[in-house]
Amino acid sequence: MSKLNIEMKPAPELDLKCFMNLMVVLIPLLLVSAEFAKVAVIDIKLPEARGSQTRSAVTEQPQEDKSAKILLTAIITDSVVTLGAKGGFMPSLFYREFHRYVTKDGLDTLVEYEPGKQPRHPSGRELTVYERYDIFLYTSDDKRSIINCMYTKFGEMLTNVDGNPVEKVVAGDTVFALTNPRRRIIVSNPAEFESKPLSAYDELKNRLMKIKERYRDAEDADDLIIAAENEVIFDKIVQIMDAARSAEFPNISIAKLRG
Amino acid sequence: MGRGRVKARTGDTNLNITSMMDMFTIILVFLIKSFSADGSILTNADNLVLPNSESKKKPQEVNLQIAVTNDMILLDNAAVVPTEDARNISAEEHDPVITKLEEKLKVCLAMEEEMVRMGALNAVHGRIIVQIDKNIDFDVMFKIMNTCGKVGYNNMNFAVMERDD
């Protein structure tokens, strides 16, 4: 009978109150020191003597023509990115610009940018720049048709041995993912890759990497001058700086295109 | 019947906090993941959206800050000049300088030089952090850079938002 009484007793519960107290202290403490939006910086060093390199980069003739400098310059306008160097210019990279707008009422739309024309919300009002969430630049040909390229599931552009974008893959193909250095992939299952519009930033990075591989010994092999039109927005400049840095051009100068 | 009477006498009802503990554990893990020992050096101006970037470099020191919004150019969170004034400087100008900003920057640089003389600083580094709204056009950005460089702030850092991996 006494044995039966012991079995009927409820199991002792773990006392969690002290652990709760600890949580109540820890959570506000961590909440205060949590960093939800991480801010980083991009280094730009201007020459000591003058504030900008504009005149020296664009209007004055280079003084050291006999040196081994390549004077690589990325020229950005509202529809074209062109890479130029001392020896000449590479074929221009045409792009079409799409803006993704996300509004508070749940609208998420991709609109092609047209200069001077602001897209509208279905309710009729104009969408503002503060609702512009992303800017995509898709490479196009001279007839303004968007060029597609294969991408990995991690969003890396695929190129062939010559460094040109790959439009289609079949099993057994050897392709290269656009990482630095390029990563070789032997395609076993083509379904692992997807065809997407070719980002102008990816193609720019690809071209810059090819230049870097070819002119690694140049005196200014780490330098890139970004020359842009007045209307080009800061976001594009930052994305191009990103592409340049990931292609090992850490020394970026800013120049301005004159009308 | 007897058992029921005993329960009523003691009134011993425990609050079950197991589910709350589960919730707290999840919150704790999330907060530890986003914990930052450095704190935030930059203060964000209103109406300023920074561009996203792959840069991981953290601002190391507290420096002079310029914020450029669509409406106003601010120096250390104090409004200096409307952004429209910077836009109105002729694009044909070879050496575009935003005069009011230049004056303020000169004062700041003079203060830094004074601090070096007093021994509070080792040297004048000419460092400045520039926060530019991602929708600001290159023209304004260039004029800001030119003005900073002309005064002597040659080591510039553009503030960006770190892109999530």
Image (tube, coloured by chain):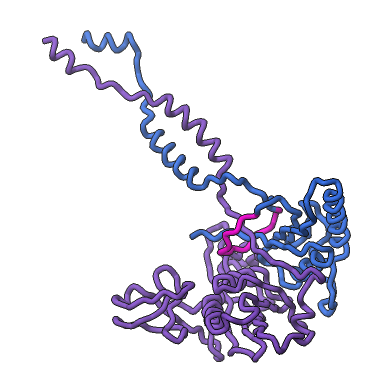
Chain colours: A purple, B blue
| Residue at the image position 62 percent from the left and 67 percent from the top | A124
Horizontal and vertical percent for residue A23? 47, 32
Q: Residue at x 52, y 81 (%)?
A: A213
Q: Quadrant of residue B70?
A: bottom right
| Magenta residues, start to end | B45-59
Q: Count all numbered tags in the image, as a single digit.
A: 0
Q: Is residue A105 above or below residue A55?
A: above
Report x, y in % for residue B154.
Answer: 76, 64
Q: Residue furthest left?
A: A1
Q: Nearer the viewer, residue A254 or A143?
A: A254
What residue sits 76% from the left and 69% below the top? B140
Please state which of residues B123 and A104 is positioned toward the viewer in this rendering: B123
Please say whether residue A100 is one of the residues in the magenta stretch.
no
Looking at the picture, how far across and down is residue A186, in whole percent?
33, 78
**Residue B104 left/right relative to A115:** right
Q: Is residue B154 above or below residue B46?
A: below
Helix, strand or loop: magenta stretch = loop
Q: Quadrant of residue A116?
A: bottom right
Q: Nearer the viewer, residue A50 or B123?
A: B123
Specify whether residue B48 is painted magenta: yes
Q: Is residue A74 visible?
A: no
